Amino acid sequence: MTARRKRQALATLCVTMFMAMLDNVIVNIALPRIGRDLDAGISGLQWVAEGYSLVYAALLLTGGTLGDRYGRTRVFRLGLALFTLGSAAAALAGGTGALVAARMLQGVGAALLTPGSLAILREVFTDERERARAIGLWSGVSALGLSIGPVVGGPMVDAFGWASVFWINVPVGAVGLLLAHRVLPEIAPRARRIDLPGLLLSAGGLGALVYALVEGPGRGWTDARVLGCGAAAAVLLALFAAVELRSAEPMVELRLFRDRVLAGALLSGLTVSFGMFGAMFFLPLMLQGVMHWTPTDAGYAGLPLSGVIMFAAPLSGRLATRYGVRPPLVLGIALCAAGLGGLSLYPAHAHYWSYAWTLVLLGFGMGLTFTPVSIAVLGRVAPAQTGMASATINTLRELGGVLGIAVLGAVLTARLTGSLTTALHRLGLPADGAAHAVATLTGRATATATPAPAPVRAAVDASFVDALHLALRCGSATLAVTAALVAVLLRPAPAATPARAPVLTGAA
């Protein structure tokens, strides 16, 4: 393949992945307008946001398997077509049910195209140095899509309405499909039996787990439906593990996780998503709910983070090639921990430029981690396993984000309820008002038409900031522990120990 053709293939993969990652977060900023125009209840809005993540996480492993069986490029194109079709259906949706269904179709498309994207990248760039640079750019564009969503989403909603955040995908998807047919190489399918039991158990188990995590904060962790889904997820995923260990051609070769490099890399992807996306999910609530910023201004606040990611992701590929994946990965996780911890030190009305340095740290840390994870995992698996490996990386990242929102959200809600109840008691107001104030602030209840008295509003704002600080510190602590653990797992083998072929390559 010529150098020009390689650049065209890389551009096609980057643009389509940017679109898929952007859609993962851009919808959140449009939810208030969607609720108003479609007269959607709070539970309906929750599913507009989370229906995509539910299907995406549940089917990612399946997408990797289907790509191996029927051809990675073919399945990639199918996923891109479904994602584009789902975007058009979402933009045209006239009701909440139709919108949720369209979002789930988008999730199916993303689950099919995401594993194939990284697998095709490996086929196009056979030289290790070229591949590291390409993965760095690919990872940076993917991460940028996740971080820039609010930046572009706010102005679009203000200017063109909520449907514009879906319409933007349609021309991009159409151009991507045309390019995919012209520049992407055809990768022959591998004769592989479809692991139907594993497919059904993984999709059912991951779907039940994500459902429980999404609904838990709203319904309560002791709700019968949440507990039932949690129990079903545990049973189905345990059965999935048992089936995969016995299968001759498993969807995920669980024995390969004995490799400490692979375990450390995948743990990094999981926990970075846990801390970063969990914490960043709640920051717009402070900017818009406490500081009263417009959606556009709140989106622009993330520009330092977005810009640094674009610089750091390609840099991390070069660092990983020269020094190995351990230094940039550990440094990136540590910078994310420091950024979240630093952000928790500032009060609600601190001047933006006084804490902008924390956003730079967060962007640099995220940019450094995305590429080494992909390089480390792809460097430990055989070419026939790249679809499975890519799907595993993205599944754990998606689950990490859902876990972060659920766990850090539970921490925030518990601290907020306690602090606000105490504050209302000091003001001589009934404590039962705390529950409604918490639900309003976290988006699970509609605000009353009568504005709250100034002392009550001040108590709500102060309690929310205090709770957000605790959630940020919990995310920071999780990342700090992970950085230390990953430094141990990825340490070089002793020089006196004879080199042994990585177990993941299938070498004897």
Image (cartoon, rainbow, N blue to C red):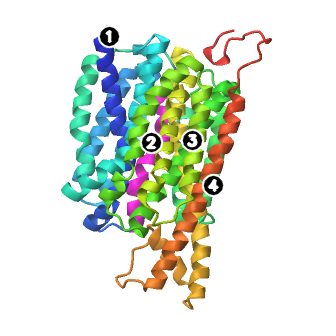
Foreground mark, 3 or 2, reads 3
Would you identify the image quadrant in which residue 327 lies?
top right
Q: CA distance from mark 4 to mark 3?
A: 15 Å
Q: Is residue 397 left or right of residue 222?
A: left
Q: Is residue 482 above or below residue 491?
A: below
Determine whether the residue tagged by mark 4 lies in a helix, strand or loop. helix
Query: Could you tell which of marks 1 and 2 lies nearer the N-terminus?
Result: 1
Does residue 25 appear anywhere in the picture? yes
Q: Which residue is mark 2?
A: 56
Query: Could you tell which of marks 3 and 2 lies nearer the N-terminus?
Result: 2
Q: Which residue is mark 4?
A: 474
Q: Nearer the viewer, residue 311 or 80?
A: 311
Q: Which residue is mark 1?
A: 3
Q: Is residue 130 left or right of residue 245?
A: left
Instruction: Give the amino acid at mark 2.
Output: Tyr
Instruction: Give the amino acid at mark 3.
Output: Leu
Q: Local crowd at mark 4 within 10 Å, few (<14), some, or many (≥20)?
A: many
Indicate the position of residue 139 as horizontal and vertical percent values.
44, 31
Determine whether the residue tagged by mark 3 lies in a helix, strand or loop. helix
Q: CA distance from mark 4 to mark 2?
A: 27 Å
**Residues under numbered marks 3 and 1 in contact, where contact means CB atoms less than 8 Å apart:** no
Does residue 208 appear anywhere in the picture? no
Q: Is residue 488 above or below residue 239?
A: above
Determine whether the residue tagged by mark 2 lies in a helix, strand or loop. helix
Q: Of helix, strand and loop, which mostly describes the magenta segment?
A: helix
Q: CA distance from mark 1 to mark 2?
A: 33 Å
Foreground mark, 3 or 1, reads 3
Foreground mark, 4 or 3, reads 3
Q: Is residue 436 magenta?
A: no
**Over which residues does the magenta segment extend?**
42-66
Q: Which residue is mark 3?
A: 335
